[in-house]
Structure formats: C-alpha cells, structure tokens
Image (cartoon, rainbow, N blue to C red):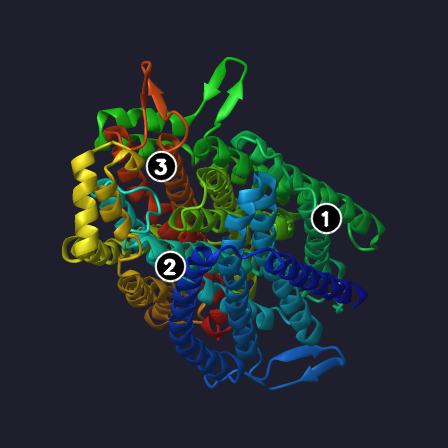
C-alpha cells in the first residue's frame, strides 16, 4: 500500500508543479491592447467549441455509464456477484463500480484537455509579448505553458488509476477507467482535428494561395479560426490523447499481473508486479519536473540548437527515471532486476521511434560527415516542378518512415517478451511513457508558439518577434511529429498488452489464424483503420469546403477586403511600405474587417457534426463483432472471443503502420512548406525559391494534403486500436457466459 500512496503523492506533486507553472505564466505581461484583443478572440472561440463538444460528449458518457452499470456491473443477463477486494479485505459488493470508473476516466480525460487548453489560450499572448525580449524568454513562457498540460495529464492519470486500484483491486474496474479515457480521447482528437484542419485549409488555400496574403494576416477571415484550431485540436485533443495512452499502459500492466497470479496464487494489494507500473510512472513524474528546469537556449539559437535544448531536458528526465527505477526494482523483494532492462527496452524503442520521426520530419534531417539524409529538403526541392511532384514525394517519404519504427517495435516486443513474457511487453510500454510529463510539454508548447506568431503578425509587433516565434513553431512541428510517433509506438505495445489481458479474461490460450472466423475478422480488423481514416479525412474535406466558400465570399462581398486584395494584385510582389500612401491606406483599412466569428462557427458546427460517425465506428465494432459471432456460433462464447481477437490483431498491426505513415508524411509536408517561408528559401540548381513563388504554392498544397493526415486521422488511430481493445476487455466476461 505504501508504494501506491507514493504514486498518488507523485501525482499530487505533478499537479502542484502544474499550478505553480500556471502562476508563473500568468505573471508574465499579456501585451498591448491589440495583442490582448486578438488573444480574447482566440480564447472565446476555443471555449465556445469546447463547451459544445463536451455537451455532446456528456450525453454519450451518460448512455455508456448506464450500459456498463446494467450489463457489466449488475449483469442483468445472469452472472453472480463479482468478488472484489477493497482496502479492508475481501467483500461481496454489488455496485456500479465499472461504470463509475468509466465516468472517472471520461472526466479525467476531458479535464486534462480543458486545463491544458485554458492555459494555452492565455500563454499565447504572453509568449508573443515575451518574444519582444528574446528567444529564450519566449521559449520559457511557451514551454512552461506546455508543461502545464504534461503535468496535468500525468498527475490526474496516476491519481485516478492508483486510487481505483487501492479501493477495488480489480482489473475489470480499472479497465472501465481506461475505457472512459479512450472514448473521450477519440472524440476529442477527431473533433478537434476536424476543426483545426478545416480552418487551416481555408486559411491556406484561399488566404495564402489564392489571395497571396501573408501567414496570419488579419485580413484573412479564417485566421482566428485557424488559431482556435491549434488549441482545440493540438492542445485539448492531444492532451486527451496522451492521457488515455498513459493510463492505458498502466492498466494493461496491472491486468496482466493480476491474470498471472489468478490461477491458484495468493494475491495482495501490494503485489510487486501490479504496483511496479504505478511506481515507474510516479518516478517519471518527478524526473519530468526536474527535466523541465533544464530546457533553455540562447537568443541566437537556430533550429538545431533549439531541438537540442529540448532533447537535453528529455534525455535528462529519461536518465533520472532509469536511475530511480533501477533503485526501486533492486530494493524490492519479489521483483527481478531483469525488469529494469525491460524498462530500458521500452525507453530505447521510444527514442528510436522519436529519432526516426525527427529524421523524416525536421529541417535538419540526418548529417554524418558528407552524408546527408534530409527528406523534408527533398520534398521542398521537388516542389519546383509543381503540385503533383510535391504530393508524390511526401507520400513516398511517409511510406519509408514506417520501416524503422516497425522494426523497433518488433525488436522491442521480442526482447521484452524474452525477458519477462507478455507482462514485460506491458512494462516496456509503461517505460516508454514514463516521462510523458516532459514529453507532452515538448509537444504542447508548439501550438502555443504557433498562436504567438499569429498574434504577433495580426497585432503588427516588430518583425523580429515573428522571426523568434516562427523558430519556436518550426521546432514545435518536429517535436509534435516526434510526440505523435512516440504515442503511436507506445500504442502498439499497450494494445498488445491489453490484447493479452483480453485473452486471459476470455480464457483463450491461442488464436489460430487458420480458423476461418479468425481469418475473416483479421481482414476486417486490418480494414477498419483505413475506413476510419477515410471517414476522418472526408469529414475534414467537407468542413474545409464550407470554410473555403465562406472565405471566398468575404473576399468578394466585404468592400474593404475586396479593395485591399485589388491593390495587392495591382502592386504584385512590391512591399506594402513602397506603395503610394493612398493605396497603403486602402490596404490598412481592411485590417480587422473580416468576419472572424462566421469562420469560427463553421468550424465548430462541422467538427461537432462530423466527429460522431468515426467515434461510433470504434465503439460499436467490437461489440457487434463479439456478440454477433456469439449469436451466430452459439456455444460457450470462446469461439466468438477468438473471432474478436482476430479483429483486434488486424486493427493493431494495420493501425500502427497507417498512423505512422500519416503522421510522418504530414509532418514532412508541413516543414517542407516552411522551408520556403524562412531565410533565403529553398535552393535548387543555384536558384532560391522563396515565399510567394510557384514552388512555395506547391508546398502549401502539399501541407494542405498532409494536415488532415498528421492532425486528424493519423493521431486518432492509436486511440482507435486501444479503445477497441479495452472495450473487448470490458465485455469479455459477457462473451464467455
């Protein structure tokens, strides 16, 4: 029990540290009146979306609570009361415990996203203001803002799982917590992703490509919606995503520890293998807090130095986690030291996936002597021959990028299993996610920096301010891609652990792919990530279409905007400050005349409408397949359970690879576009292609294609495969009645 209480204490320390960081951020100046006004618009739009999204999800949560209480907890279909072990000893208890755990997981996931977004929409103005005083100052504010999200996620997550385990000591109950976290995460990720990409596409294709406006020009009607999208998709959605990844790995490990001892072995609350994932997570929280203090850089740092400043914090936190874990395992009776090497395996696999993602998505690529491997630069160079070349190059890079992560995951599975069986695979996933606190901080600071750049542009702060925020944003794109790759890799290990737990609960020892039912479901499962992605991308397309029509309408119907665009066309590439004074006045008069609220409303309505179908696909499929096969095949349900296992296997393998492809292709396209927008642009055969060139426009189109892949369907897939597996785990007792 002491170890569990220490894990809860570590979570509390994480939340206290998050609160202190909130205080630190809020103490920073929020900027001049123009900065504050723009920040208020972003804040209002973000809050409005989240209220509407959570009101819809609340209905879903209530329905699921009732279903779980009736069919799982009270089991009206006919099982006896399930024995649970409370803190006071073995008790017979009928109660909606799994349903309540589900509710706690759903609330925890939503709360983590809400807190992260609430501070992000306040940290963006402060980052823009801090950028006036240097790059390091801006980094500290943006990174502190992102750290609030990271520490909130791990704090709420470990307290929730530890408390439920302390009270019930029953994997079926804490599986409900994971179910709640995963279901909310999926809807939040899909809904937020649809919102942000619809706005982004409208802002880029119409505002930048058609109208020729600068990034985040206040004359672009979609610019506020675009900045709102960064918060609801890349902050709130991402927070919910990492929350379910984090708790899912812990729950899977506890479940496997329980199943390993359930066949005639005595069991106690302090069983070392059940407590170990909680301890590792707690150590990771403390290590993450210490690592946060090590992130800093100079005011003249380039992208490479910025990346290394973030890496230093991550690597330091990882090293501290390993030291703490080694000490605990070595001093704990009942734990073999080889479990430490399992944790090392998980961390190494995570770093390999992250480093590979960085190679494929960053400006720097990989340089060893004269050898250079730079896929992003290659995509940018291909843009000189037009849009098709850009698209083809990005697709090929995305496909290539799956090789190293797939091999790393396979090697990690093999090594972990050799060391500690299926339990080892689960512990490897926990080790991979132990430093989620700082990993998510590195991920979440990017949208804050992106927002800060937009605010700087719209409020006409000095050019060096936008240059500093752009540097932070470019690094943020890479770290976001690394974070997504990291989450996808951990999803593979976690899903496998949950899969093993499902087999144990269902009483399945093997799943024979030669079995026609298993084979059929294997193919159906492999198809589902493609269907899910198609639905998500199609949803972005429909929402983006509505946005494009609205932005084009405003450029046509609002006199000030129409006049400003006419003057831009008349003067071509000539800088505005070189225009005649009368023309400059016409151009400046259009500032703020766009109807931002219309675009915000379009993105909000589309996201809420379109997120439902992909979410229901994930929730209903395992239920329909499991009980459908049980009805069709009859018997004791074990054959149906095996068929459902085939479905889960197919979803896991194809989902991981498809998610990696989409996340990395999208990240590479994004940074290829940004190469044209910085410095001298992209050199091809001695000619530099800069912002506004045809090559740049091709890069923008490539980024537009990649946006829904990397920010909507791709990161949602790692939630999909875990959600389906945890649902199967929850319903398994009913299948084998």
Labels 2, 3: front one = 3
User: Which residue is under mark 3?
Assistant: 669
Q: What x and y, as percent, mark residue 69?
A: 50, 82
- Report the side of 30 relative to 621 (left or right): right
Asked if the residue at tag 1 contacts the one at tag 2, i.e. Cβ–Cβ closer than 8 Å, the answer is no
Q: N-terminal of the two: label 3 or label 1? A: 1
What crowding class fits label 2: few (fewer than 14 Cα within 10 Å), some (14-19), or many (20 or more)? many
In the depicted structure, whether residue 295 falls above or below residue 633? above
Q: Which of 359/262 is in front?
A: 359
Asked whether residue 160 is in view, the answer is yes
Q: What x and y, as percent, mark residue 695?
A: 27, 29
The disc label shown at residue 581, or none: none
Labels 2, 1: front one = 1
Asked whether residue 516 is in view, the answer is no
- Report the side of 228 relative to 349 (left or right): left
In whole angstroms, how far apart are the C-alphas of marks 2 and 3? 21 Å
């Amino acid at each position: 029990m002491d170890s569990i209480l220490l894990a809860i204490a570590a979570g509390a320390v994480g939340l206290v540290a998050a609160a202190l960081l909130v205080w630190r951020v809020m103490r920073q100046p929020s900027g001049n009146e123009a900065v504050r006004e723009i920040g208020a618009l972003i804040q209002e739009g973000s809050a409005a979306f989240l209220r509407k999204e959570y009101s819809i999800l609340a209905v879903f949560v209530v329905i699921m609570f009732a279903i779980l209480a009736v069919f799982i907890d009270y089991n009206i279909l006919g099982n006896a009361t399930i024995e649970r072990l409370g803190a006071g000893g073995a008790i017979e208890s009928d109660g909606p415990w799994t349903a309540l755990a589900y509710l706690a997981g759903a609330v925890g996931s939503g709360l983590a996203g809400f807190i992260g977004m609430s501070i992000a929409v306040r940290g963006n103005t402060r980052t823009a203001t801090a950028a006036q005083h240097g790059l390091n100052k801006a980094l500290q504010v943006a990174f502190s803002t992102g750290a609030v999200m990271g520490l909130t996620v791990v704090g709420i997550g470990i307290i929730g799982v530890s408390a439920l385990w302390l009270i019930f000591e029953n994997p079926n109950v804490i599986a409900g917590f994971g179910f709640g976290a995963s279901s909310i995460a999926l809807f939040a990720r899909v809904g937020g992703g649809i919102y942000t990409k619809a706005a982004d596409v409208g802002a880029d294709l119409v505002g930048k490509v058609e109208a020729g406006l600068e990034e985040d020009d206040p004359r672009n009607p979609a610019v506020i919606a675009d900045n709102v999208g960064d918060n609801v998709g890349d902050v709130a959605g991402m927070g919910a995503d990492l929350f379910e990844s984090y708790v899912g790995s812990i729950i899977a490990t506890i479940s496997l520890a329980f199943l390993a001892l359930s066949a005639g072995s005595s069991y106690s609350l302090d069983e070392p293998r059940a407590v170990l994932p909680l301890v590792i997570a707690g150590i990771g929280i403390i290590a993450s807090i210490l690592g946060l203090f090590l992130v800093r850089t100079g005011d003249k740092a380039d992208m490479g130095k910025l990346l290394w400043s973030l890496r230093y914090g991550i690597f330091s936190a990882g090293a501290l986690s390993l030291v703490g874990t080694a000490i605990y395992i070595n001093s704990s009776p009942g734990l073999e030291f080889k479990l430490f090497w399992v944790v090392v395996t998980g961390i190494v696999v995570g770093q390999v996936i992250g480093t590979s993602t960085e190679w494929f998505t960053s400006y720097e690529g990989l340089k060893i002597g004269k050898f250079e491997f730079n896929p992003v630069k290659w995509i940018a160079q291909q843009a000189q021959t037009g849009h098709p070349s850009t698209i083809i190059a990005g697709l090929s890079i995305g496909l290539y990028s799956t090789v190293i992560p797939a091999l790393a995951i396979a090697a990690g599975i093999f090594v972990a299993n050799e060391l500690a069986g299926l339990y080892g695979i689960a512990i490897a996933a926990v080790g991979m996610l132990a430093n989620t606190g700082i990993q998510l901080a590195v991920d979440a600071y990017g949208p804050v920096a992106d927002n800060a750049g937009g605010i700087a542009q719209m409020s006409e702060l000095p050019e060096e301010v936008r240059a500093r925020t752009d540097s932070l944003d470019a690094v943020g794109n890479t770290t976001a891609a690394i974070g997504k790759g990291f989450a996808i890799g951990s999803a593979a290990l976690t899903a496998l652990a949950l899969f093993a737990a499902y087999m144990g609960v269902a009483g399945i020892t093997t799943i024979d792919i030669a079995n026609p039912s298993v084979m059929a479901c294997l193919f159906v499962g492999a198809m589902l990530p493609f269907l899910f992605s198609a639905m998500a991308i199609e949803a972005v397309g429909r929402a983006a279409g509505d946005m494009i029509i609205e932005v084009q309408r405003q450029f046509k119907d609002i006199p000030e905007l129409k006049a400003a665009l006419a003057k831009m066309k008349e003067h071509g590439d000539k800088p505005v400050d070189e225009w005649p004074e009368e023309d400059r006045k016409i151009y400046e008069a259009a500032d703020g005349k766009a109807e931002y609220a219309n675009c915000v409303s379009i993105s909000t309505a589309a996201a809420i409408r379109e997120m439902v179908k992909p979410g229901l696909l994930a929730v209903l499929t395992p239920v329909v397949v499991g009980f459908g096969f049980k009805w069709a095949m009859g018997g004791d349900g074990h054959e149906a359970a095996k068929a459902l296992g085939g479905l889960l296997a197919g979803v896991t393998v194809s989902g991981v690879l498809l998610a990696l492809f989409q996340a990395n292709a999208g990240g590479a396209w994004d940074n290829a576009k940004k190469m044209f927008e910085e410095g001298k642009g992209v050199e091809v055969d001695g000619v530099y292609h800069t912002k506004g060139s045809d090559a740049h426009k091709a890069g923008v189109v490539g980024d537009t294609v990649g946006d829904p892949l990397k920010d909507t369907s791709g990161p949602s897939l790692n939630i999909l495969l875990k959600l389906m597996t945890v649902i199967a785990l929850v319903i398994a007792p009913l299948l084998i009645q």
